[in-house]
Amino acid sequence: MKRETLIWLIVLVIAGIYLSYRFATVGIGSVYVQELGGEQAEAGVAEIAAGTATLSVSRTFGVWAAAIFTLCIFSFLYRDNPLYKFAESVVVGVSAAYWMVVQFWGVIIPNLLGKLWPAWIQSWAMPGLSPLYGAYWYMNLIPLALGVMLLWRLAPKGAWIARWPLAFIVGTTAGIRMVGFIEADFLSQIANSIVPLVVATDGSIDVWACIRNWIMILGIMACLVYFFFSIEHKGVVGHVSRVGIWVLMITFGASFGYTVMGRIALLAIRFEFLFDDWLWLIDPLQKRVGL
Amino acid sequence: MKRTVPLLITTISGFLLIAAAFIPATESWGEVVTVWFDILAAIAFILGGGNLMKVNLKKISDRVPGWGYAAVTLIAFLLTLAAGLGKIGSPPASDQEFYGETFASLPAAAFPESQVTRIAGEIPEKEEAQLPDSVRRQMSQEQGEIVFRGWILPNQIEDLKSFKQTLEWQCTVENLAEAAQPPESLRGKAFYYSDHSALSFRGVMDEASRTELAAMSDDTRWQQAVDSIYEASQKTTTIDVDAVPTGFAVPASLADVVSYSVSPQQLSMAGPMSRSQRDALINVFPPLRPASEAEIQQFIDELNGLGEPLTEEQQQVVERNLRGGWTAEELITVLDGAGQAQPVAKTACEMLAEKEQGVTEIDPFHPPGDDVELTNSQQAAIGQFANDESITVADLVDQLQAETFTGAQAGAMAAFFAASPTAGGRGKTIFQDLLKLPGTNLSTGQRDWLLADFRSEFEWKKSVYQLFTAAHTPKYTWSGPYQSGGNLFWWLYEYAFKPLTATMFAMLAFYVASAAFRAFRAKNLEAILLLGTAFIILLGRTYIGVAMTAWIPDALKAFRIDELTIYIMSIFVTTGNRAIMIGVALGIASVSLKVLLGIDRSYLGSRED
């Protein structure tokens, strides 16, 4: 056995003993639920003390599984290893199926099958649906046919058949995006940038608001000059585009700062889960006081 | 065929959406195309799943290195898929079930001819709009009359009223709603659900109702449906109960269907149980009365006797909770408020009559009547109820109804008591509030005593829910949400998908930080601006960053790091993002046009196949 493997084995065994001891004595990671009419709600100390809550084996196992998955992913910080690969494989499988299920029940059943076979869908999946055909229901045969053609990609031959639905997806995406971006980004951003260069409040000039608006207008113009590649960035154009770069650099710096903070917040949430929900080492929300 | 048709599809679908944005007449086309897009996007997820299976099965079959991980992916995929598509562990959707009713399948054609309603009138013709879905199968126009097959339901009345907003039509619907009802003795009991092709009966069907229903038609299907409901509604459900509330008596409104036996302790329900029946059975716990000083002291003494005596702070918590209930004055104010007269809406037929009499400005409401305020004796009865636990809510209602007491006031009183804490709720709140105080260490005896009422109330509630569920026969077993709390799909999402994806994103914090450490070098002005801004923003979002510059006097507060962050975000970042968004929008518009005009055909792939 390699020395490194031995060290890791010892670390894991010690961790396993510690966790088993804490689970047996304190019950770390345990989740209690109160069940009423088939619906479960997570129980607090009062419900546990009153004896109306019961230990949920599935949820307790879930907390342990989630903690182990979290550690498996974190293990990649050391280096690529089988535990990380295992967790990675699970996330790929679960997420692919998750989105498939969401789309099936959320889109395909109500928007496609529910319109083509309303009575059948109403009889088992959507009791609230009218069993009657709507006007022009047969038009929904088109997306059904395109869908079947799209799935043809899985067949060994005739992959070109999937081009038709793909072309539809590309065309509609282009149409939606074009209109959406022109309306929401292009026109509305220009409209919002048309601001007064001299701001007067209560009869006097608001110097700070004037400076702010000037910086904004000049900054936007400078950035747009930088984006204009049809002329060479030399002379005045070069100087202006340089100012544009400065504004962009400040923007990118701020975006970078926010991204890092967002990731660190996520990291803190993961650590909170490990130390609070799983190991019961901290209790910031006082969930277990008196347990 | 392989390239020209896709090009045409791209162009047509794209320009259709662009046209829909600018030409109102083509708006509906755009909506249709968008729905089709959503459908194809959803099918693309199925394609993705299929592809994942194909790739991983090949890896396993070829025994490529790491095929074991492919097997893990496949197992996780199939397990999640089965759990989600099969809705494993999902109960039927409670809002889609008909609690308290018994069903039998009955096609609309088998509905008795004697119950078909015919009224004078004409169904309005509307361009592009059919009759509402809920009535289309039951309603028709025959020889100048409107014919309705079945008994009209409240949702059908609403649908019909919103079909055309004229007084004439609204009045016709009101007349239809009055006429298309079952015989008086069966009103509120027998229903026909055309959408579900089902006859239904609320509660237990008695012999008289059965005879009356059976006599409506000789059709075998009708007879079978009536017999089937009669048989099913006679079912009595019995459950064992561990504890019943002290002094429990079946509420008078349920005396016909609910029975309780002391030995063995069992609760029985005849026929199915409705939600209102369930709630009436649950809410048998009397509302708490305002506690007197003596009662508060007695409460504290009892608690002290069961363990370590309460500290002054703990006593204050207990006293605050015991005093925090309702008062007689509050109840009187609520009832007087509910007694204020409200304007009553006129029916469409009343307004139509006014219109025909030549009234030009029709008031849609009748003038409100007189306000009803509680009399002195009614107020005294409430005061007595607040101080005397031997008086029940039913007794109080009897006393109040001896004089003028409106339905709105009765409803307001029921809501008032429903919102008032019970003994169990109060004990639980005191227990939770005491635990929040640092150093509280309640003995087992104190805990048990405080939570005893809560425990018995919950056990009772649980028993009633058990009876409610057992007495109900689900009509749509597969109608529940695919992700209902506690089912397998929810478990996989909550304990596998969510932590795994969140941790993967969280881990990027390390990589972003290490990449920044290597890449960021303040070697020129641009790099200094980027690095400096990131530094200020990062510090500005932390407590330490704000604390570091908190000492700067107010006159120069613009240089505090949190203020700097605000300036940077509101001025420079807005400026930069605006320019980027304008640039991106122009880029997307030009790329979209290139695709739609067939200039960019890269999405079609190579010409080889």
Image (cartoon, rainbow, N blue to C red):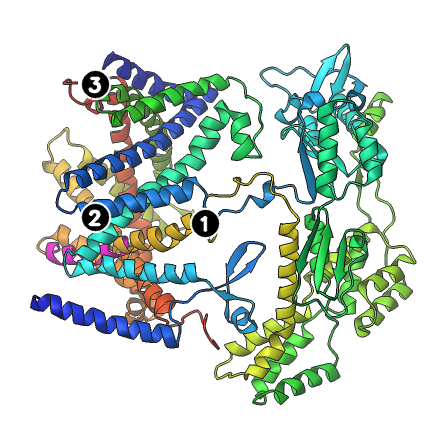
Q: Which residue is mark 3?
A: B599
Circle 2 SS class: helix
Label 3: chain letter: B
Q: Nearer the viewer, mark 3 or mark 1?
A: 3
Q: Are marks 2 and 1 on the same chain?
A: no
Are the residues tagged 3 and 2 within 8 Å (C-beta)? no
Residue B183, position as x, y percentages in the image: 83, 31
Label 1: chain letter: A
Q: Nearer the viewer, residue B241 or A125?
A: B241
Q: Residue at x 15, y 38 (%)?
A: B62
Residue B31, position as x, y percentages in the image: 45, 25
Distance of mark 2 from mark 1, alpha carbons? 73 Å
Q: Residue at x 42, y 39 (%)?
A: B85
Q: Which image quadrant: the C terminus of chain B?
A: top left
In the picture, measured across the screen, residue A246 lies left or right of residue B299, that is left
Q: Which residues are magenta?
A: B505-521
Q: Which class describes the residues within 10 Å of circle 2: few (<14), some (14-19), or many (20+)?
A: many
Q: Which residue is mark 2?
A: B69
Three-letter amino acid code at the position of disc 1: Gly
In this rendering, the count of numbered labels is 3
Q: Which residue is mark 1?
A: A203
